[in-house]
Image (cartoon, helix red, strand yellow):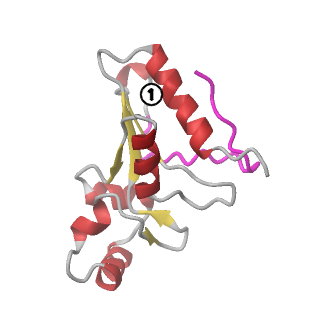
Amino acid sequence: ATAAADGNGSGDRGATTTTTWPTPDTQGAIMTFSLVDRNGRYFGLSEIDAKAADANVDVRTGCMCNPGACARALGHTTDALVAHLDAHHPVSGMHAATCGGEDRLGPRNSPFGAVRASLGVYTTMADVDRFVDWVDKAFVWRGD
């Protein structure tokens, strides 16, 4: 597998982390990330879900059942989150905002959630290459 270019010259791959892994031995086989377009805007989680389904690629989107840690990792304050939920989800509340919706929070236009790809015991290098190819073809801008 090879790393895809960001396409906009920013060098931003949309990766977010709140933990430092001292060695590869302590890191699990899960990659959590966001995808940004050529203008630096995050792709909506529903769009990513739809493109993954069309390509038969298995990823999970949203907050992975941990909205508090998700908000912290994305830099959303409690006040910003409550204001967003009050404005956009007065009835459905937290569930709608944390389970993969298109809504965006905060001044950085960052989504409330991320994309997660997991490797398992039966994952092959061909599976990894297919995943990287999908990201490259579905989300990397090559110019007009």
- Helix, strand or loop at label 1? It is loop
The quadrant the N terminus occupies is top right
Q: Is the residue 108 above or below the residue 116 in the image? A: below
Residue positioned 27% across, 60% down in the render: 68
Q: Residues within 10 Å of mark 1 (few under 14, many from 20)?
A: few
Judge whether 70 appears above or below 82 on screen: above
Residue 5, how many percent across, how many down?
69, 38
Q: Give the extent of the magenta segment.
A: 1-20
Residue 10, x across and y down, in percent: 72, 50
Which amino acid is tagged 1?
Answer: Pro
Q: Position of residue 83 (x, y in %)?
A: 34, 82
Q: Count all numbered tags in the image, as a single digit.
A: 1
Q: Which residue is mark 1?
A: 22
**Residue beneath the point at 62% across and 24% down:** 2
Magenta span dominant secondary structure: loop
Whether the magenta-drawn stretch holds residue 19 is answered as yes
